[in-house]
Image (cartoon, helix red, strand yellow):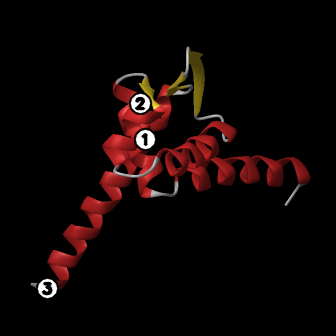
């Protein structure tokens, strides 16, 4: 594999790895609806603020989200709105898998 091609796939893998956690997928979904502060995300997830902050850092380092400060609060929003499109693909794979399993049972 050529170096440029390898770098392209490494960049893709970094983004997919950043999304590869249930809480991070939840965060992406929540931020697709509206900009939200860390404290509200922590409340929605049911985790402490430091854990949610680590998840947010991973997503931000991958370029999926961005933040802004307002007083003492930090608000996050999607940087790339297309990140939610991955849910459609994942749901299609899940549905196909279920259909295959149902066919195997018959």
| Residue toward you, 64 or 10 | 64
Q: Which mark is residue 27?
A: 1
Residue 75 vertical placement versus 102 (above, below): above
Please give the residue where the numbered disc 2 appears in the rendered image.
31
Pair 3/2: label in front = 2
- Percent from the top left, x then y, of residue 84? 42, 37
Residue at point 44%, 38% (across, down): 28
Q: Which residue appears farthest toward the front when viewing the image?
A: 72
Residue at point 25%, 60% (across, down): 95
Residue at point 24%, 73% (across, down): 100
Pair 1/3: label in front = 1
Quarter residue 40 falls in: top left
Q: How many marks can you see?
A: 3
Secondary structure beneath label 1: helix
Please give the residue where the numbered disc 3 appears in the rendered image.
105
Q: Is residue 30 left or right of residue 69?
A: left
- Percent from the top left, x then y, of residue 18? 59, 51
Secondary structure beneath label 2: helix
Q: Which residue appears farthest toward the bottom when viewing the image?
A: 105
CB under 8 Å between discs 1 and 3: no
Q: Which residue appears farthest toward the left when viewing the image?
A: 106
CB under 8 Å between discs 2 and 1: yes
Disc 1 crowd, CA 10 A, few/some/many (<14, 14-19, 20+)? many
Secondary structure beneath label 3: helix
Quadrant of the rendering where the C terminus is positioned? bottom left
């Amino acid at each position: 594999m050529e170096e440029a091609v390898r770098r392209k796939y490494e960049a893709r893998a970094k983004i997919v790895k950043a999304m590869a956690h249930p809480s991070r997928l939840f965060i992406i979904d929540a931020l697709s609806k509206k900009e939200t502060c860390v404290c509200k995300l922590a409340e929605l997830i049911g985790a402490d603020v430091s854990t949610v902050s680590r998840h947010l850092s991973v997503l931000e380092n991958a370029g999926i989200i961005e933040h802004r400060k307002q007083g003492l609060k930090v608000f996050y929003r999607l940087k790339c709105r297309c990140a939610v499109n991955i849910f459609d693909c994942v749901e299609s794979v899940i549905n196909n898998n279920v259909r295959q399993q149902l066919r195997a049972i018959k």
